Image (tube, helix red, strand yellow):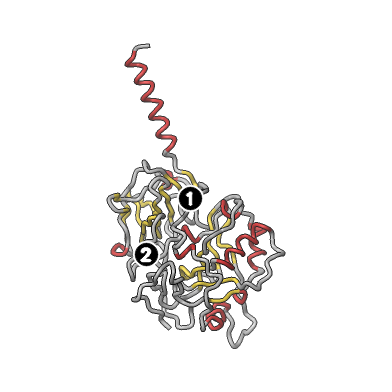
Amino acid sequence: MPVRRLLACAALVTATIVVLSAAPILNEPLTGRQVFPTTNWWNLDTSHAPVDPRSAQLIGWISGRTTSNPSAIRRLHPDFGPPPYGFPYVVVGSDQIRVPLTFVDYGDESDAGAPSLPGYPIPDQAQTQPHYIEGDVPGGGTSGDRHLLIIDRDRWLLYESFATRWNTANGRWEAGSGAVFDLGANGRRPEGWTSADAAGLAIFPGLVRYDEVFGPNEITHAFRVTTRDSNGHVWPASHTAGSNPSAPPMGARLRLKASRDISGFAPEVQKIFRAMKRYGLIVADNGSDMYISGTMDARWNNDVLNPAFAALTADDFEVIQLGWTPASTLSAPSNVRVIR
């Protein structure tokens, strides 16, 4: 075969390999990858953190108890499961083409891309296929929170956007807000800024993930939780989305009490609940009380998860000291105030 033809064939094979390696992967396990440093707020062991003086009052409000209905109590709920429940995420390579993302609500608090890397690496498949955007509607649709979570596995960057949709009429991607996080650093959003989440935090590191729950190791991070309202924010949150004086602030941490017996639950559920005892829950958005965020994954069995989570109530938790952080690892900024 002529040399020129051999070279052409070799080039074709190489090009094919590049295309295959660039394919986005939904819910790719991140085995062995540390999501944010161990000193990051999502990864802090809170098992010995002090309880906040207002813990009982805040838990009482979260529980929904009132003088007219003192027995009311909010139960935990897994805000995840098979499609359409939970947050999907997609993992791409560094060769994924980045496209502009137009912000229609919080443009002045959003990232146009990573430093020196404008745009978001949104796969073309997200325009026409489900499972890419929260809500499970191809292209995002026009209702719901429509979060889009993308991880660049090579650069170890996390791209997140809120109210994401493909605008067919304008031929462009739009979002209410967006943020890019370096998963190898402890970068916090500028004070007062949102992210793709109301608290200004990253979403992905606070999700209950299938690969972690059914993997061999313990879960070593906190989970994202919502409450029906909020009051200001405390570290590590950077953004305020409510001013109800009875509610907890964004960034508040709830911890499953060490005394709560979890031995009767399925092994995978015990693993989730052990993480709640050690790392706790971080209030990250306004929503349904005690809804715990996790990934959209067809392998979840809600017939197991729903009754197990419902067996825990708000009263099984305590609020640790607002704005708490170990002095030996991170320092909370002095300009973060608790609004009481």
Q: Position of residue 6 (x, y in %)?
A: 37, 17
Q: Position of residue 290 (x, y in %)?
A: 56, 70
Q: Is residue 144 visible?
A: no
Query: Which kind of residue does numbered mark 1 sit on?
Result: Arg
Upstream in the sequence, badge 2 or badge 1?
1
Identify which residue is drawn at 34% across, 20% down: 7
Task: Label 2, secondary structure: give it.
Answer: loop
Query: In the drawing, what numbered circle is on residue 188?
Result: 2
* Residues packed near mark 1 inside 10 Å, few (<14), some (14 to 19) or many (20 plus): few
Position of 63 with respect to 110 (left or right) is: right
Q: Position of residue 173 (x, y in %)?
A: 35, 52
Identify which residue is drawn at 38% across, 21% down: 9
Q: Is residue 57 visible?
A: yes
Discs 2/1, front: 1
* Residues packed near mark 2 inside 10 Å, few (<14), some (14 to 19) or many (20 plus): some
Q: Nearer the viewer, residue 63 or 156?
A: 156
User: Which quarter of the image is occupied by the C terminus?
Assistant: bottom left
Residue furthest to the front: 328
Q: Position of residue 260 (x, y in %)?
A: 66, 72
Task: Label 1, secondary structure: give it.
Answer: loop
Residue furthest to the bottom: 67
Q: Nearer the viewer, residue 6 or 230?
A: 6
> What residue does disc 1 label?
33
Query: Which kind of residue does numbered mark 2 sit on?
Result: Arg
Identify which residue is drawn at 54% across, 68% down: 280
Q: Nearer the viewer, residue 54 or 230?
A: 54
